[in-house]
Image: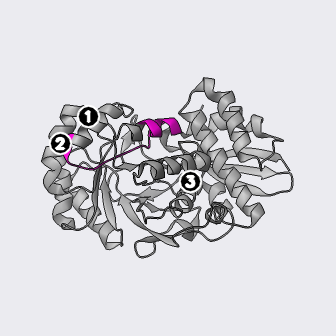
Amino acid sequence: MSIKKAEAIAVSLPFDIGGPKPTFAGIPRRMEILFIRLENHQGLVGWGEAFGLSIWPATLQAFEHLVAPLVIDQDESDISGLMERLTRQLHILGRSGAVTYALSGLDIALWDMAGKKANQSIGEMLGGPKHTQLPAYASLMRYGCEQLVKDNSMRALNQGFKGIKLHETQVGLVHAARSVLGPHVPLMMDVNCPWSIEESLRAAEELCSAELYWLEEPIWPPEDFEALQQVRTQSGIRIAAGENNISVLHFEQMLKAQSVDFIQPSVTKIGGISAFLKVMALSDQHQVPLMPHSPYFGPGFLASLHLASLLEEEVMIEYSFADLGANPMGSAVLLDQGFLKIPQGPGLGQDPELDILREFRVRPQG
């Protein structure tokens, strides 16, 4: 059997975050998902997701013009062999960014096809899930406003979320959230790599009384694992990072440097399910808990659920705190009393709703 068709499908969905939408390069944030669709010569379809956000046009172009031509007529059952060949063949174009994101989406779609052929979920194919559901924490957008931080933190708590993650950089806004959440709700702060060691330690000193569950990605540049280790050692606050790691080797280096208390691989960025499994093995080897980076609503989110269900310990799942005006994945990505159920069907367990993909499909401009 071999691949007959490979395409990338971008959708831009209506959504609400309980406040003004952040901007990037002067453009208001959109809820964009880049679906990857594979079909073999027998008509079996597999779905994946490549990292989108503002880079989705480049990722789409990378998939259509570089990846797709190389996978046509290739054996879809040889996932490891195909991914190894493509990674080596395309490495000259960059070991991260659009090409790797496109390959990540391809890998997820290949696993979805494999599960459907075997009539097993991805979790079942990989030895069986340890959990039937996992708790979710709300990953809030950056508001920059005390009242919006308080209101949305409480709104998320009232919806059943088991923890709250802020994307603020102002220490005062973290204390504002803690003041309304009380002392027992896990509260995380993701600052997205803005600070030096000295700036991180100053912030950590001011954050101590907020009792953060973790501080995420404080250091610039994110690959400075030695600096990250110094912050972890000197701050007294647990550190999480990993969504910006460009390879499995990066995770190994991070863990050897003892830079983090939690590692956060992103299945749509690191190389798909195949690469994620290697990071899981490193997590187990170094005894550092894994918390998936998963602010998605597409097949990448379902892949994250299946992978997290394989872990012995129950982990919290990152969930973008947004209300979608249209939801291609249906109930498979909806919260149920603070928990997310592990999909039970073959492969990822849920195909996207094609009518929604058609209605909200977009193409790069120009």
Whichever of callouts 3 and 2 sits on the residue coming sooner in the sequence is: 2
Q: How crowded is mark 3: few (under 14 residues within 10 Å), some or many (20 or more)?
A: many
> Which label was assigned to residue 221?
none
Q: Assess whether mark 2 and mark 1 are in contact (beta carbons under 8 angstroms).
A: yes
The Cα–Cα distance between marks 3 and 1, rounded to whole angstroms, is 29 Å
Residue 22 painted magenta: no
The location of residue 335, given as percent across then percent down, is: 45, 70
Q: List the single residue furthest toward the bottom.
A: 337
Q: Quadrant of the C terminus?
A: top right
Looking at the image, which is closer to me, 350 or 24?
350
Q: Is mark 2 on a helix, strand or loop?
A: helix
Q: Is residue 93 left or right of residue 317?
A: right
| Residue 181 percent location from the top left of the image | 22, 66
Residue underneath mark 1: 195
Q: Which residue is drawn at 22% across and 38% down?
A: 200
| Residue at which label 3 appears | 300
Mark closer to the chain start, 1 or 2: 1
What segment carries the magenta color?
234-253
Q: Residue at x 61, y 47 (%)?
A: 274
Q: Earlier in the sequence, mark 3 or mark 1?
A: 1
Percent coordinates x, y for residue 337 in the rendering: 41, 76
Q: Nearer the viewer, residue 328 or 177?
A: 177
Q: Please, what is the three-letter code of the amino acid marked with disc 3?
A: Gly
Label at residue 203: 2
Indicate the amino acid at tag 2.
Answer: Ala
